[in-house]
Every structure is written in C-alpha cells, then in structure tokens.
Image (tube, helix red, strand yellow):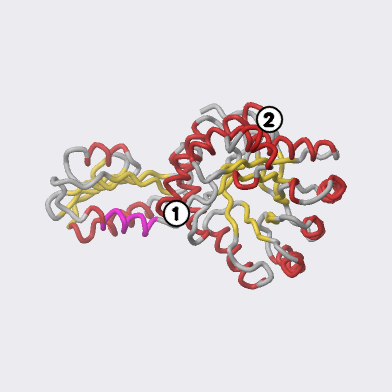
C-alpha cells in the first residue's frame, strides 16, 4: 500500500504524518477536573494501546486541573477546546501536546493569533476539527450540506492559521455519514499535505459504531489516506482503542499482537468452536509479539489453515489437533484445546 505523503508533526513523542506509523487516539469521558479519575482512565487507555489521549476542557474548572494531569503522566495529551480561546492558552501553558480547536468558534482573528502564538512558543500543533454539524452557514448556502462544504470549511480555518503564521497543523473532517466522511477526506487529501486525523463522528453504540468506523476509516486507509485515527463510540473508550488497533491490523498497517484466524461455524463443526475461539482470544490478549493463531472447526480447511499459521488447532469429533509452524504437535480432547494451544504459544515466545 502506498500512503499519501503528508507533512510530519509531533504530538509529544508521537509523530503524525511523513510516513510515521498511524497512531490510535481516544478521549477520556471523565470530568477533567476529577484529576484522579482522569489519570486512571489515561493510564487504562495507554495500557490498552492508545497512543494519544484527548481531554475535554469546557470551562475554567477543567483548565485548572490541566497542570496537575500533565505532571502526573507521560502519555501525549490533547486539549479539546471550543468557544473560549483562554482555555486553549491555559492548555498550552500547562504543557499539553496538542490543541484541538475549530478556529471559527474561538473568536476574532486576534484571538486565534494569541492561541497560535502560544502553541508556536511551546512547540504544540493544532488540530483543526470540523464536523458536518459545524459548517458555516455561508458555505452551506453555497454548496449545500455536502462534503465540499465540509472541506471548504476546514481549508478556510487552515488559511486563517496560516495568515497568523502558524502551520503546525493536523486536520479532521468528520460526519456521522460514512459515504459523506469518506468523500470529504478524499477531497481534502487532494488539496492539502497536512496530516489527517480520521474518524466517523457520532457513529453510534459499540456494535454499529465499529461497523461504520471500520468501513469509513478502513476505506480511507486502503486509499493510503490518514495519519492518525479515533473510533468514536458511545461506549467505554477502551473499546475505541481496541477497535482502532483492529482496523489497522485488518488494513495491514499494524502487525503487533495476536492475529487470530477462525472459521465460521457450520454443520461440519464437531467442537464448541465459538467458545474455543473466544477462550483463545482471551488467553492471548496480552501478547504483543506479531503472531498468527488459527482456530479452525473441521478437517475441510482446518489443517491447511492451521499449518499456515504460526500456531493453530483444527477440530475433530470431540477432540482436535494442534500445530506449530505447520508441524503436528499433538492431539488433545476438546475441553483442553484452547488451554493447550495457548500454553504452546507462550512456550514459544
């Protein structure tokens, strides 16, 4: 896959663009002024594989908590700011690693300049985040509620930052419509080389949200578009991180951790394949090394697929066989298949 070239920026120790690995982001759903709860969630997100964590900063109370949060964690942090430019200045002073704003709702150009100057002085990039619900009325009247209007809005905000001498920029153009989002990002990628933050906004609860995000984000990744992503779900933020990592793996852009290949169930299956696959996935969830494990239900495709994996099993009638690097290791009863396979995997790490 050939990724589109983009300018490189740095968010803390994480690089975006310029061919850097695509990073996964999420956002805390704690109240930011609850410092203890927010720090606990930042740690949980980082432990789950989140590269960059964003915090809402809706008011002065939240802004006052930022220095203490910044001192207590090394995780790259983004401050999400709307309407009040002073909150962005507070986040910059607190040492946050990126500011997310919509320059159009921050205020006058002088206020945008103050934010840009503070970010420049502290080496902090700005993400211009435009959603379909925040497109200016004039653009809607000109283009209608279209991807073109969304892109023109984002590029207008880019020009505003560039006028005040700031170009350390990342851009997102999100909609809750998957086709709308994909078309907007494709159009945007034709007009800028700033790094792009991918996502389908307000995608829904975990089940449908993951599907929408996989289709939207995945389509763009396969086009070579995108430098960082967030899967936005009405769910535990940990689920966003897991989904984001899974999307990158499915697109062939991330190889760390266990890739489990398992076949669909059918009338030929003579073991509890669903339970076995879940058990294997659970037992190997902490492994970071890039390995492929096959969990196959019968002898039709099972032995062949299992042999092509690093490790694998193929079910029979109440039992199964376990493979390592294509070589048969042993035959074991069904109730021990998952545990025996996982024990073999760990012995080889």
Q: Which residue is mark 1?
A: 287
Q: Does residue 280 belong to the magenta stretch? A: yes
Q: Which mark is residue 226?
A: none
Q: Residue furthest left?
A: 317
Main secondary structure type of the part rendered in magenta: helix
Q: Secondary structure at mark 1?
A: loop
From the viewer's perspective, tell me whether residue 47 is left or right of residue 308. Answer: right
| Magenta stretch, residue numbers | 275-284
Query: Disc 2 vs disc 1: which is toward the camera?
Result: 2
Give the answer, above or below, for where 60 lies relative to 103.
Answer: below
The x and y percentages for residue 253 are 50, 38
Q: Nearer the viewer, residue 230 or 159?
A: 159
Q: Nearer the viewer, residue 116 or 290?
A: 116
**Residue 72, image quadrant:** bottom right
**Residue 7, image quadrant:** top right
Q: Does residue 58 belong to the magenta stretch? A: no
């Amino acid at each position: 896959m050939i990724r589109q070239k983009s300018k490189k920026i740095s968010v803390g120790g994480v690089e975006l663009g310029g061919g850097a690995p695509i990073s996964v982001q999420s956002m805390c759903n704690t109240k930011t002024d609850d410092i203890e709860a927010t720090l606990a969630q930042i740690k949980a997100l980082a432990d789950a594989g989140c590269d960059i964590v964003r915090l809402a900063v809706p008011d002065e109370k939240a802004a006052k908590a930022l220095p203490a949060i910044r001192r207590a964690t090394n995780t790259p942090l983004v401050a999400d700011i709307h309407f009040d430019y002073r909150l962005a200045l507070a986040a910059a002073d607190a040492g946050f690693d990126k500011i997310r704003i919509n320059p159009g709702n921050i205020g006058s150009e002088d206020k945008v300049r103050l934010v840009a100057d503070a970010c420049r002085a502290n080496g902090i990039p700005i993400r211009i985040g435009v959603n379909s619900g925040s497109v200016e009325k004039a653009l809607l009247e000109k283009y209608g509620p279209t991807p073109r209007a969304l892109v023109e809005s984002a590029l207008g905000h880019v020009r505003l930052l560039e006028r005040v001498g700031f170009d350390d920029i990342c851009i997102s153009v999100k909609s809750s419509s998957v086709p709308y989002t994909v078309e907007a990002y494709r159009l945007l990628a034709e007009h800028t080389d700033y790094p792009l933050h991918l996502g389908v906004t307000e995608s829904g609860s975990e089940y449908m949200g993951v599907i929408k995000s996989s289709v939207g984000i995945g389509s763009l990744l396969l086009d070579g578009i995108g430098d960082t992503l967030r899967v936005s779900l009405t769910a535990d933020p940990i689920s966003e991180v897991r989904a984001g990592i899974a999307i990158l793996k499915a697109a062939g852009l991330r190889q760390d951790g266990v890739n489990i290949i398992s076949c669909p169930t059918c009338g030929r299956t003579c073991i509890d394949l669903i339970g076995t696959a879940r058990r294997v996935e659970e037992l190997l969830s902490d492994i970071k090394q890039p390995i492929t494990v096959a969990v196959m239900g019968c002898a039709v495709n099972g032995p062949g697929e299992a042999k092509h994996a690093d490790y694998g099993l193929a079910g029979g009638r109440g039992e199964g066989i376990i493979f390592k690097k294509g070589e048969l290791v042993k035959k074991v009863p069904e109730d021990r298949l998952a545990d025996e396979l996982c024990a073999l995997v760990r012995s080889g790490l």
